[in-house]
DNA sequence: AATCGTTACAACCGCGAGCCT
DNA sequence: CAGGCTCGCGGTTGTAACGAT
């Protein structure tokens, strides 16, 4: 609602921080935590507004910030996440440990964006610029679906952030009991203050994108009364957000259990042990409110995959926009997924998603150096225009990642 | 050495969401 | 429920550092 006066107040200093100011701010937060940012400057003896103090702390003084050059892997992650999430720097930052959203934003604007533009790629759409001339064919549909995926992931991140805040609130009393010398005093919503318990989590779509199919599906798990499925193939035990190596070794299985200590978004099958189930609800382990809120997210038009049906022979995902039916084989293999999604319209979200997954199932060198341009031979070679469009799409993304990963002398001329 | 242009990054600004009273 | 307050986010600006001429 109303805006705070903040820096409008006269007599408050602006501009670069001096070492003395930094020291004051550090000393105060070390001892008391930041508490109310608005009240902090007066207490700390600073002639700054609270907002300025918060920014200085979160973007510069916080001890858990990694500074310096971005690694190739970080760059790749930023590009991929930006393709999925757009300018949602805070969301991107949650997947880059010890990097601030501001730093990532700056790095994007000064480095990565320019690189993409020099490569003839629109940094906004992540598509070749001349691609804009294409009509409403499969590619544009794929792009739309990609955006769709992004919206899903965005919504999930929002829910995670909310969950983190709630967890933070719940644990605040516990934290207060900890010695005041503890040098954390994090902002409740600062990326690094989020409950990073255990391995840093990877963006689900990103993982899946890189070919993460983690766990064979079996009837037992499906038929269980409360089986939960992570639609995006979430792998909870991944060490690094961008560590995809190794998952390519087993690229042909879809994850059926996204349940982990930090998992937040689950599809829960409320069926009986016979395996028959209808009207399965989307379920969030925290509360359904988060899901309900998705429809009101900033993007405003999230899909509603609100039905998952199961019977003995198949499992189906249904939304207002997309439908997918998969056989209830012992496993969902790349082959079965492909064959069972071919009948779906080219604009189908899941097909695109699957295609992306499958397209990388054989070239697991995307995330690490040494990769070669994938020709997606063998089972990846589909037929028809839709397949060609998908192929172009894959090649485009591969080219981005390979260029970023392998800035060979010839490539570097483009940068 | 001086000037100008470019780059990189810290910091600011304004908006909107959510919380509190 | 309404309105005020706080905070976080994303866009933008300011400026120091660097490089080219």
Image (cartoon, coloured by chain):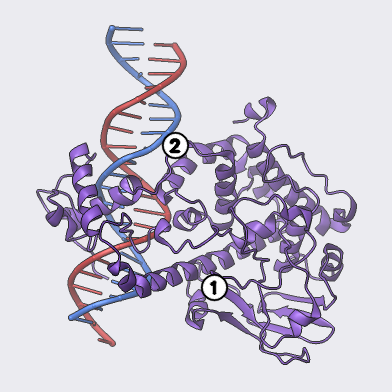
Chain colours: A purple, B blue, C red
For the point 42% across and 56% down, which residue is it? A192
Query: How dense is the environment of label 1, judged by Cα within 10 Å: few (below 14), some, or many (20 and up)?
Result: many
Tell me which chain the residue with mark 2 is part of.
Answer: A
The number of numbered badges drawn on the structure is 2
With A211 as the anchor, is A26 left or right in this view?
left
Residue closest to the eye, A186 or A112: A186
Query: Residue A413, labelled with which disc?
Result: none
Real-space Cα separation, disc 2 to disc 1, in angstroms: 32 Å
Q: Is A290 drawn above or below residue A347 in the view shown? A: below
Residue A205 percent across, percent down from the top left: 63, 61
Tell me residue A300's x, y (percent).
Answer: 50, 71
Nearer the observer, B16 or A69:
A69
| Mark 1, residue position | A264
Query: What element does badge 1 sit on?
Result: loop
- Which sits in the foreground, A58 or A181? A181
> Which quarter of the picture shows residue A406?
top right
Q: Is residue A114 above or below residue A6?
A: above
Mark 2, residues whose alpha carbon is within 10 Å: few (<14), some, or many (≥20)? few
Q: Residue sitting at 24 percent across and 58 percent down?
A: A34
N-terminal of the pair, mark 2 or mark 1, is: 2
Find disc 2 in the rendering and name its residue. Answer: A68
- Dividing the picture into quarters, in which one does residue A15 lie? top left
**Looking at the rendering, in which quadrant would you find the N terminus of chain A?**
bottom left
User: Left or right: where does residue A25 sit relative to residue A55?
Assistant: left
């Amino acid at each position: 609602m109303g805006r705070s006066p903040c820096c409008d107040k006269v007599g408050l200093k602006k501009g670069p921080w001096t070492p003395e100011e930094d020291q004051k701010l550090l000393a105060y937060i070390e001892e008391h935590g930041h508490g109310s940012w608005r009240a902090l400057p007066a207490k700390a003896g600073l002639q700054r507004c609270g907002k300025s103090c918060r920014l200085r702390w979160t973007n510069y003084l916080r001890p858990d910030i990694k500074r310096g050059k971005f690694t190739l892997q970080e760059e790749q992650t930023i590009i991929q996440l930006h393709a999925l999430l757009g300018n949602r720097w805070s969301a991107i930052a949650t997947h880059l440990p010890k990097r601030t959203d501001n730093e990532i934003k700056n790095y994007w604007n000064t480095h990565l964006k320019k690189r993409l533009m020099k490569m003839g790629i629109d940094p906004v759409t992540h598509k070749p610029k001349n691609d804009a001339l294409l009509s409403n064919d499969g590619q544009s549909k794929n792009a739309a679906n990609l955006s769709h995926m992004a919206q899903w992931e965005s919504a999930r991140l929002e829910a995670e952030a909310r969950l983190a805040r709630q967890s933070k609130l719940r644990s605040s009393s516990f934290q207060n009991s900890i010695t005041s010398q503890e040098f954390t005093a994090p902002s409740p919503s600062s990326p690094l203050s989020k409950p990073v318990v255990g391995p840093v989590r990877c963006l689900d779509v990103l993982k899946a994108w890189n070919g993460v199919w983690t766990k064979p599906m079996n009837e037992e798990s499906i038929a269980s009364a409360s089986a939960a499925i992570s639609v995006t193939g979430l792998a909870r035990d991944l060490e690094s957000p961008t560590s995809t190596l190794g998952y390519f070794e087993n690229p042909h299985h879809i994850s059926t259990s996204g349940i982990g200590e930090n998992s937040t978004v689950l599809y829960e099958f409320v069926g009986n042990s016979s395996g028959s189930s209808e009207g399965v609800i989307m379920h969030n382990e925290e509360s359904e409110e988060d899901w309900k809120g998705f429809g009101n997210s900033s993007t405003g038009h999230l899909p509603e995959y609100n039905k998952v049906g199961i019977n003995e022979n198949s499992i189906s995902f249904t939304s207002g926009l997309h439908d997918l039916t998969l056989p209830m084989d012992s496993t969902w293999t790349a082959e079965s997924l492909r064959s069972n999604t071919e009948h779906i319209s080219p604009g189908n979200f899941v097909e695109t998603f699957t295609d992306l997954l499958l397209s990388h199932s054989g070239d697991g060198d995307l995330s690490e150096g040494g990769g070669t341009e994938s020709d997606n031979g063998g089972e990846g070679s589909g037929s028809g225009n839709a397949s060609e469009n998908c192929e172009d799409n894959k090649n485009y993304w591969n080219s981005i990642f390979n260029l970023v990963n392998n800035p060979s002398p010839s490539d570097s001329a483009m940068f």
